[in-house]
Amino acid sequence: MATYVEVRPRGDHFYAYEREAYWDSALKQGRKRTLRYLGPCDEHGKILEPAKVQLKGVHSSFPVGPLLVFHASAEHLQVRQRTRKILGMDDEQAGHFVALALNQATSRVALDHLPDWARASPLPQLMDLEPESLTEGAFERVLSSLCCLNKAKVWEDRGPLLQHELTRAWRSQCREPPGAYYDVTKQPYYGWANPYAQRGHDANGGISNVVGFGMVVSAGHHHPYLCRALPGSQNDALSVTETVRILQERGYDGLRMVMDRGMLSKENVARTRQVGYHLVGLVKGWSEETLALASRWSEEELEVPAYVVRTSRGSVYARAMTEPLWDIPRLRLAVVVNTRRKREEREGRDLALQELEGPVSKEQLSELKRTLKVQDPRRRKKKGYVPGLLVRCRGRRGVQVDEDAVRQDRAVDGRFLIFSTDLSLDGAEMYQAYFQRDAIEKVFRTEKGELDMGPLRYRKKDRTDAYATVLYTAALLWSWSEQTLKRKFPEMSLAEALRSLENVSWVRFGVGKTVREWSTRLTEEQEEILSALGATRYLPSP
């Protein structure tokens, strides 16, 4: 079939039409038909004025703003091509995987409703997919390709191979500092028979049936290195060794790992150093040794301009030293003092001590004992023991203030210790490295919010493992889009940009016997955002 422009005279005017020559198989002869009216023209076919189309009805409308943003990122990172190469899929199956990731990043409809969503969306046009191929079985086959039984009847999770390939893709296209952040989130599970679903601590601090997901992200743009499912009851610290092993085997050398203090142990520090990674973390709990280190410098020695560090909420002071700790001969330690927290802690303790000196009721006395804490010599040597400010004595109250303990407590008001196995870091660098871990907490907030990580409803282990790779891909599309946005709008978050695009729709109108496609009219801001994200070219044009 071939199309051409035909010019038709009518009186003193000329009009242009787009015509098509085609083969009529029923009549077994060539025929011609008009596809559309182009508008008035000159005798040579030059359009003088675009045709004014008469619309006879809206066939459908689909919100497409966020979808085009993430589709643009998927195209830039060649997710479809890389999926096809790594998993051995054909082009259609690889397109179905991209549709799974785009759904996770945007509408997040359940698997049994996904075919209807995909067919109603512009994905068939954007990715050249047959609408009839978008079935629940097709998406199930994609998940099976990510994790399935091999010929030896052993479960083979191929999702990490794809994660590694996509990590190589983003690492080759952007310069990132060597930092990486690792954390675990627990998501509620409503269902039965999933081996990952176990009784554990949920996001609300309670105990429920949960599935864990561990994620490692980069320090700069928060691109994911790894996402994997974990048993819900497993202590977060127990996942560190396997995570570090996976990162090492993938060839990610020289990383500086930052972890939550709940993951840190002497064994995890040693294991991380064995593979050549450095570790930055918060020293958890107080002991006589760490209290002595934290109070080494007086306020006059610590709170000086040389050690001030600017933060998003003001400033702190951080001074570093190299000392032995946890049987490690040389460890870099930063004494950090938050002056606002110091003032609050000091005022709260002083008010409680003042109240203790006056007449108090039994209820007030009990509350003050809980606040100021009564020393227990039997627990002094235990890990994490915090010395109390009161000691037991004879008398009606049964306690009195330990002035030495008060002076010791006052010396560490607002202070905490950060450690690093990298001896080259100063106090400011250690503070900034650790508290940039807020990045991964932001990632998990995005996963649980905009990307809707849970609640999970996959009952099989293989489906949960496969879902981790879908989450990885959606997180990458999110972080890559945010990185792209920051180049032109450094103060705008991606969430804000996507909210401004919510009313951008892909609309199908009836025009005679045909259907034409347009996008809703863009505001100036919407056009600038879509252009910055490389998504404008995917909008339909009449």
Image (cartoon, grey):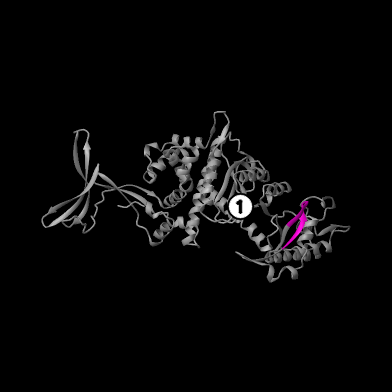
Kindly report the secondary structure that dominates the magenta region of the rendered protein. Answer: strand
The total of numbered circles placed on residues is: 1
Q: Residue at x 19, y 52 (%)?
A: 16
- Residue that protrudes farthest toward the left in the picture: 11
Which residue is disc 1 drawn over? 180
Q: Is residue 278 visible?
A: yes
- In the rendered structure, which segment of residues is drawn in magenta? 320-331
> Is-magenta flag for residue 73?
no
Q: Is residue 165 above or below residue 423?
A: above
Element class at badge 1: strand
- Left/right placement of residue 371 relative to residue 147 reads right
Q: Position of 140 compared to 188: left or right?
A: left
Q: Residue 22, percent across and down? A: 22, 40
- Residue 133's place in the image compared with 479, above or below, is above
Q: Quadrant of residue 435?
A: bottom right
Amino acid type, mark 1: Ala
Mark 1 packing: few (<14 Cα in 10 Å), some, or many (20+)?
Answer: many
Kindly tell me whether residue 201 is visible in this rendering: no
Image quadrant occupied by the N terminus: top left
At a point 52% along the width and 37% down the height, the residue shown is 146
Q: Position of residue 76 (x, y in %)?
A: 45, 50
Q: Position of residue 319 (x, y in %)?
A: 71, 64
Depth check, front residue: 237 or 413:
237
